[in-house]
Image (cartoon, rainbow, N blue to C red):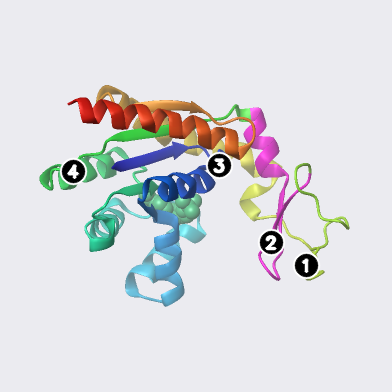
Amino acid sequence: MHLILLGLPGAGKGTQAKNIAARHGLLHISSGDLFREAAAEGTELGKLAQQYMSRGELVPDKVTIGLLLERCAKPDAQAGFMLDGFPRTIAQAEALDEAVGEREAAVDAVLSIRVPEEELVARLAGRWSCPGCGAIYHQLHNPPRRERVCDDCETELAQREDDRPETVRQRLEVNREWTEALERYYERAGKLHAVDGTGEPSAVAERLFEVLAGVSAAAQRV
Ligand code: AMP
């Protein structure tokens, strides 16, 4: 199966991509992770990507498409993949369609996790992380025992620059633009499935599994 997961920041895309990949034996490919790995390795591509990432801008299509299509063509992706963070532009979606179409393995379904804006703001703006050990807390859902101090290593917690309440709305707005454009693209192809992303992560996972069971059954009937 070849799947794409869409959702605004805070919708739970990363968590659910892992759930689906594990359940269906798919390779989870996160474009953000690929760029961060390349940056950490200090490759030419990584250095280039880092310039865009640090400004919060999209890495140019030419670079992104090359990297992602190469990853999707590797042997460990042959059993299927779950894309997370890619495509983010129509040009990327078209390039993916062309590439997987050539290998007779077109995109089967695009799952869009929907969460109301107010809840996304609350989720993102309440998120704090530990610069020491990377632990993640949430003001409401998973607070540390001592205010703004890590339970595990006692480092003072910090908020990601782009998780500050004043920047969260703007970040959502920018993401909404390209997410909606991609949704229209895949809706026209009859591949889009919207899933309610509110409630417990396990409940959201069940909804996604249900949609995918329908997609598999429909594919077998063809
Ligand atoms: P993410 O972890 O998905 O938020 O991605 C982190 C950063 O990597 C983004 O802010 C972009 O700079 C870059 N990036 C990730 N995926 C893409 C993509 N599909 N197209 C362009 N840039 C991307």
Residue type at the position of mark 2: Ala
Residue 19 visible in this rendered orientation of the protein:
yes
Q: For label 3, count other residues whose C-alpha is less than 10 Å away and answer few (under 14), some (14-19) or many (20+).
A: many
Sequence-first disc among 4 and 3:
3
Q: Which mark is residue 105?
A: 4
Sequence-first disc among 4 and 1:
4
Cβ–Cβ below 8 Å for labels 3 and 2? no
Residue type at the position of mark 3: Gly
Asked if ligand 1 lies within 8 A of label 1, the reply is no
Q: Which residue is mark 2?
A: 135
Quadrant where the image shows the C terminus: top left
Question: Measured from the top left, where is residue 106 in percent x and y?
Answer: 20, 39
Cβ–Cβ below 8 Å for labels 4 and 1? no
- How far is disc 3 from disc 2 in space, using C-alphas? 17 Å
Q: For label 1, count other residues whose C-alpha is less than 10 Å away and answer few (under 14), some (14-19) or many (20+).
A: few
Question: Measured from the top left, where is residue 9 in percent x and y?
Answer: 54, 42
Q: Which residue is mark 1?
A: 152
Under circle 4, the secondary element is loop
Under circle 2, the secondary element is loop
Residue type at the position of mark 4: Ala
Asked if ligand 1 lies within 8 A of label 2, the reply is no
Cβ–Cβ below 8 Å for labels 2 and 1? yes
- How far is disc 4 from disc 2 in space, using C-alphas? 38 Å
